Amino acid sequence: MRASDLLKPRPEGLYCPPGDFFIDPVRSVGRALITHGHSDHARSGHRSVLATRQTLDIMGLRYGEDFAGTTQAAILGETVDINGVSVTFHPAGHVLGSAQIAVEYQGMRIVASGDYKRQKDATCLPFEPVPCDVFITEATFGLPVFRHPPDTEEIARVLKSAAQFPERSHLIGAYALGKAQRVMRLLRDAGYDPPVYIHGALAKLSEYYQSQGVDLGRLEPATVGSGGKADFTGAIVVGPPAAFADRWARRFPDPISCFASGWMRIRQRAKQGGVELPLIISDHGDWDELIATIKETGAGEIWVTHGREEALVRWCELEGIAARPLHLVGYEDEGD
Amino acid sequence: MNRFAELLDRLVLTPSRNGKLTLLTDYFRSVEDPDRGLALAAITGDLSIAAVKPAMLRALVVERMDPVLFGYSYDYVGDLAETVSLVWPQAPESIPNHAPTLAEVVGRLQAASRSDGPQVLARLLDSASISARFAIIKLVTGGLRIGVSARLAKQALADLGKVDVAEIEELWHGLTPPYTELFAWLEGGAEKPRSAALALFRPVMLSNAVDDGDLEKLDPADYAAEWKWDGIRVQAVCEGGIRRLYSRTGDDVSGAFPDLAAAMDFEAALDGELLVGDPREATGTFSDLQQRLNRKRVSPKIQQQYPAFMRCYDALQIDGEDLRGLAFTERRGRLEAFVGTLDPSRFDLSPLVAFPDWEALERLRQAPPHPIIEGVMLKRWDSPYLAGRPKGPWFKWKRDPHTVDAVLMYAQRGHGKRSSFYSDYTFGVWAGPEGAEELVPVGKAYFGFTDEELRQIDKYVRDNTIERFGPVRSVRADRKNGLVLEVAFEGLNRSTRHKSGVAMRFPRISRLRWDKPAAEADRIETLQALLD
């Protein structure tokens, strides 16, 4: 059994011929296994979907209950047989419900890790290293320049700035699924008690996180009340990044734009985006996490996908680990 | 060190002046001596440490990591200091128990010799956090480039101590890092430092613009008039053999004008305009003057081609006597006598312009005798020389600005209050033969309009976007479609950097011409005519 016979890239996504299923397909297929709920990995319209309960719930919230013909909830750590191929989901530490998928057949085990991180995150289960023959890793931040600082330091900077500029509002751009809730949770863990104001696009998902036992504290819609702009003096507002460039943002007094993303490590990226307070908070592993994880899995071969494949492949070569880029289409390597 | 690094990180991304001032005063208030003083010196450019060349920095890093991985990293980031700060491999055993202070870092760098400089730097980088590494590299490679002028840093000090910035400027050149006695005074713990240093800067007197209706209330007989020269305001101070040429904000610019400094063999403090040419024959234009500006070193050829001279209009001190308390009319008399004793190729007197009434002065203002005159100055005969911008004694009455009708081409999102508005506009005028006209960009403006007009332009930009690049939108602009902006500006320079060949000085939007078809906007020839 060659690894490339067990999983191979196809235009629809990563395909398992003996099991006849796809992992995170970008087009409609018969049977899809889905690692997590971000829209570039979880699309609607498949005949059947296997994913964790939380990922299925999130897909239901985003696409409506009829997002797939049939669904099956994968239980973490429990093996499912699909046409003779053993499939097991393990936590990936990326967002609520995210999982790596281990695929095993005739003694060969490949782990498709989807997106993952190793920093601790109170809004989801931590990544679990799974020994394997081939490890498929993402490479969103696959360059030695990406080094994420502790998220607590980043949140402390927002709170310091809020104290320095009490007459202004702080707008934190954060992706609607995962990052936004992590930011809210970090604010609470840092002792920030006032309500956090949120953009409408975050409401359903944040409510879902709360229902899953992730306490986000008091959230209020960022809509203008009778007081107008003054309502948001000193407020912390969380919303999708695009909203802050939009007319929606005019309701806030002299806002300081913050953006929570691993890309904020690069000053020029922050500058170009007009970000005044970059927050280096990422749901993807940084360079050190990626290489530590590769070593930890003990895999003899590494397939590198979405992101900066070349540097990670180069690092594997230097370490004497076989590695190649896996050219999958359709994933956003810019997302974080 | 970490707090200094954090300050730099914030300053670089904070566009608003007030925001920067808050960050600076908070830093000065919360950080102790001598770190805060060293940070101040680093910002004002008064900190001297041995420089490390970029090539050395690169050599240090590839000793420590795979050059191919470094190459990928540098290509991605694009900035050497930033790349090195990020990729520098940190051995856990090298992390000290406490982060080094700025004073420790500066001390070690200042003690380093040229030959062991790189190794000292490497050890500092080993023990620093990522942000601190960036700050250290910026210190040793020279030039923080954080968008904070020395003047702004002094304003932050003034805010800290609730004193006038003129007081800081007056003291500044007598002080040295880490400015402990200055901070002690600003925080109320000590007397104002008294400087024994010679040839210090005297805070300058500034004027207010003449507003509508101002002149009707004033008696022309109370005021002297002189031409307003469009050069660089300077203060020439010589005391006990020390010679200094200061800019209007108190920066020492003697180094850029060695020819003028060499002729400063007197005991006085004079206020005037720096211009180029020979005052006895011809005064150069602003374009000529530009050949002497923003240069670190001035070649003998440029000095000869564009000699600098000073057109004097006030005397603050002569032979040890402080004249600032005297009336303008008395100071003027002293100045006239004194300038007559100086090298006539380097110093002359800004002549007074006689006028019977405001109407007559208005006619002179509209048709000045030289292109480098940008209006007239009015000075009350009885006014003393006061630091700052007192309302009443001095007025500037500028020539009306030039205007041009241009077409909006690109719009960029603003910052802070304007971050959801497209508020920075690039505009162009027509060029090319009839039937094949094209817009060429001639400038960029981001003020001059009201809040309501901003809303209208923003809507227009959003409704007429044809392309987006990051925060910039390209707006539909052709012969049939386009928004015409009336742009006011003070003057025009030749530019090799702009495709149009011209660069505007002080452009702003003066009117929105919703009524005017794009095809009727001005042509580039209209602007070119202003150059000659």
Image (cartoon, coloured by chain):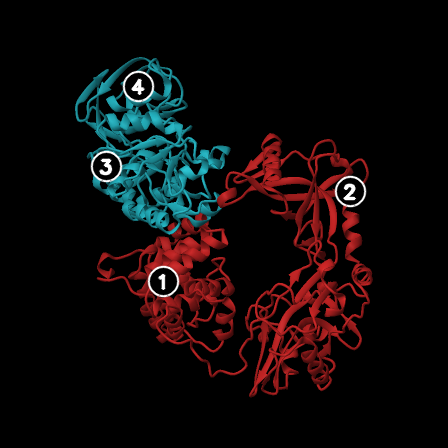
Chain colours: A cyan, B red
Q: Which residue is mark 2?
A: B432
* Residue B450 appears in the picture as rendered: yes
Label 4 to label 1: alpha-carbon separation: 63 Å
Q: Answer yes or no: are tags 4 and 2 on the same subunit.
A: no
Label 2 to label 1: alpha-carbon separation: 58 Å
Residue B311 to residue A285: above or below: below
Identify the mark at residue A205; answer none if there is no mark.
none
Q: Which residue is mark 3?
A: A122
Q: Which residue is mark 4?
A: A21
Q: Residue at x 76, y 38 (%)?
A: B437
Residue type at mark 3? Ala
> How many neighbours does mark 3 have within 10 angstroms: few (below 14), some (14-19), or many (20 or more)?
some
Residue B24: x %, y % from top left: 42, 59
Label 3 to label 2: alpha-carbon separation: 63 Å
Q: Looking at the image, which is closer to me, A315 or B355?
A: B355
> How many neighbours does mark 1 have within 10 angstroms: few (below 14), some (14-19), or many (20 or more)?
some
Which mark is in front, 3 or 1? 1
Residue A142 to residue B186: above or below: above
Residue type at mark 2? Gly
Residue B15: x %, y % from top left: 49, 51
Chain ID of residue with mark 1: B
Q: Answer yes or no: are tags 3 and 1 on the same subunit.
A: no
Which mark is in front, 3 or 2? 3
Residue A49: x %, y % from top left: 30, 17
Residue type at mark 4? Phe
Identify the mark at residue B29; answer none if there is no mark.
1
Badge 2 marks a residue whose secondary structure is: loop
The quadrant of the picture occupied by the C terminus of chain A is: top left
